Amino acid sequence: MPTSRAWSSIVAVSLLAGAVHADVLITEVIPNVTTTATRGDVVELFNTGPGSVDLTEWVLTDLDDDPIAAALQDATFAPMGLGVPPLEAGEFAVIDFVDAAGTASWHATNYGVRIVAPLQVGSFLGSENDELLLADASQTPIDFVAWADSGTPVSVDSREDLSAVTGALFDYGLTPGGAAWSGAETVVDDAGYYASAVDFTSFVGVSTWGGGAIRRRSTDGVFDVASPDGVAQWEAVPRHRATLGNASDDVPSGSGLRPIRITDDLADWLGQIETTTFPDRRIARFADQDPPDFAPAGGPEKAAFEAILALAMAGSWEEAFAAADAIGCEVVEFLDTASGETFHLLRERFVPGEIGFTGRGVFAFFAGGGVRDDLVIEIPHPIFDSNTLEEGALALPDVRPRVLMIAGTHRNNHLDETMCDGTFDGGDPYRISDVAHHPDNFFHTAHVWLLDNLADMRAIQFHGFCCPGVGDYADLSDDSVMTNGFDAVPGLSDFGRIWSERIEAQSFQTDGVDLSTVAIFGEDTSHLGGTNNLQGRVSNGVTVGLECNSEALGAGGRFHHLEQDPDVREEPQHVLDALKEALDIIDDLEAPCPASPAVGCRAPGKSSVLVLDKAGSANDRFLWKWLKGEETELVDFSDPVSGAAGYRICLYDASPSPQPLLDIGTASGGSCDGVPCWKPLGTKGYRYKDKAGSNDGLSLLLLKSGIAGKAKVIAKASRDNLAVPALPLAMPVVVQLLVDDGVAPQCWQTTYSEIPKKNEPAKFKAVE
């Protein structure tokens, strides 16, 4: 390979000869990264086209003696044996220069290719007075960038304070744009641009991740993919503004704008966003700030955020990216190196301390294999409740919720007090920066929107307290407290109870101490119930807009609030394992009606069914009576009062329409109108009653055991939550009750085969 002096000669001659930018550009550089086996300086290349480019034996060098990979391949990032594929037109190559303990590798990405190139010795690029040359396999220079230090403030001489420049000749003594500066690329005298550029030397002291990035920009602020060889401008930006795999956050794609991209270990990366030394931090860490970092969100901002949220949930990332800028946000496409899967983040564009930061939070979205479409995990107090952020970060790729919500501020960041109910810390009012106790923020806005748009949304909130047996919790001996946000004993099929049982089943211990004991709020403890949590209140039926000062009248079963002591939060994997098990169990209990009727069901001696589909959904009705039926023991109904089972009523007909035509379901336990939904009928059976018909319109389900000719089932549903099938129906019609406790499913059935009494567009009535 050429020596440093030889490379300097090639740069001076070949660049002047016009061999600049054949097909590939250096578009971004992150220098001065503390080099490890998995992280180091990063360089981004972009193939402008029109054809593909074979990068084998291409070189990236800073013209110093910093060998890469092996002595015989001084600066080759894609050696022959590595087998890096050609870089297609419009694709990016991102090269990580790690230390010698790393392994040379490459993998395909959503933007092109990621290459890991171990350094043989030493480091590579520095923050001050360094340069980077790209040359092809024939040692022909392709592109070149250099950056210098400066002792002159921008306000005095913006030209001298240029953070990153390119040119045919590199000479630390030359003034960019001066008479001695020449070549295919020169620097335009644009005082406005330079005045707004960030001095790269200010990042010298921040080296864990690299203090900043040097990005290529065009004169109009947009990198022109179709014509990249015009006058080049460069800017230095903080590390969190790096846009690897995208050249710049303004790069257009074939169908519009593309989001910023990051490739890293997602759980590790998210777990650091509250750390002040982390360049990509997004959480205001400190309490009692004056002026505060957090700013409440007004109505127009919340409406704009809801529109972006709708785009994100629909997977319209280009549109979401374009719309986010108006409210100071951005979309990040995150390639998780641990799983190889792609996630998306919606976050603030700014970091704490920058003008424009408001503490609005980070929202992560996942739509990959095994995603739990209706699950939302929420971290409302990432600083105050220590380690809950890390717990949520682990849960995203592990538990696989549809959305992970992370508040963007310490709960006490703002000095102003919320007017919502509740106090903490011995009677101090909550602050407006507490997203669980004030509605004017993106966190609560997102929860309400998701509750309205995910049919069966289940929200999990991770919280922390200190400590069992201490202070206010002297009478509390358990490591965690489970609540559904309502002060009543939950049924055994309540998800929170199932989750708590699975936590205790883990029998997790640290240093001989069991950390898997869970108290149930309303049963085992009166502490930490979360009854004034705003997300819990709206989930439990409080009208949006009234949740600040209105208590819920019951538990909707879709909000679960877990308080954990510090030891549990430090090692939460057993909690996450239990969460996955509980979700699987509840999925079985809430499984919909099967696509075809079950077989072997008990038959009635007498039965009738009525379906009304009238103008206005409030007039719709379903009534099924299964009477004088086959022998049924009480245990066959499971135990909906204190047991765990799912109950479904299914209607099928003989039409080619997708079956079942009607699917009404509920679970055991639960609260309806402030009282238990289920009640025992002596020793003979059970009755479910819900005037509101909150579960698919079901208002009554009567289950009575008995000898042959005495057993009875009656089901009634009506009003807005009932989705009646289109009438008339095709005979025969089958109606079933399915009871599934996960062990021995049972069923009761009527088959209506005779000519029905009514089978019209508004009414179906049949007897058997």
Image (tube, rainbow, N blue to C red):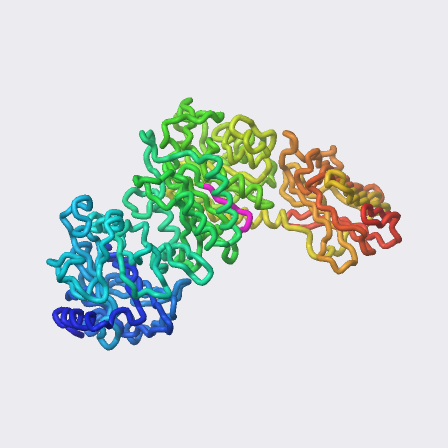
Give the image location of residue 612, x and y in percent. 79, 44
Q: How many marks?
A: 0
- In front here: 220 or 703? 220
Based on the picture, tell me whether residue 309 belongs to the magenta stretch: no
Is residue 353 visible in the rendered image? The answer is yes
Q: Is residue 535 above or below residue 588?
A: above
The image shows residue 316, relative to residue 423, as above or below, that is: below
Relative image position of residue 359 (x, y in whole percent)? 38, 38
> Is residue 510 shown above or below 141?
above
State whether the magenta stretch is mostly helix, strand or loop.
strand
Question: Please, which residue is most extreme toward the bottom here?
Answer: 138
Q: Is residue 96 visible?
A: no
The front one of 620 and 296 is: 296
Residue 513 at x, y = what percent? 39, 40
> Which quadrant is the N terminus positioned in?
bottom left
- Residue at 33 percent across and 48 percent down: it is 280
Given residues 363 and 713, the one toward you in this image is 363
Between residue 101 and residue 616, name the one nearer to us: 616
Residue furthest top as drawn:
427
| Image side of residue 433 versus residue 503, left or right | left
Q: Residue furthest left?
A: 173
Residue stretch rendered in magenta on the structure: 372-378
- Residue 373: say if magenta: yes
Q: Is residue 30 left or right of residue 266?
A: left
What residue sits 83% from the left and 56% below the top?
731
Query: Would residue 401 appear left or right of 513 to someone viewing this image?
Result: right
Q: Residue at x 47, y 60 (%)?
A: 255
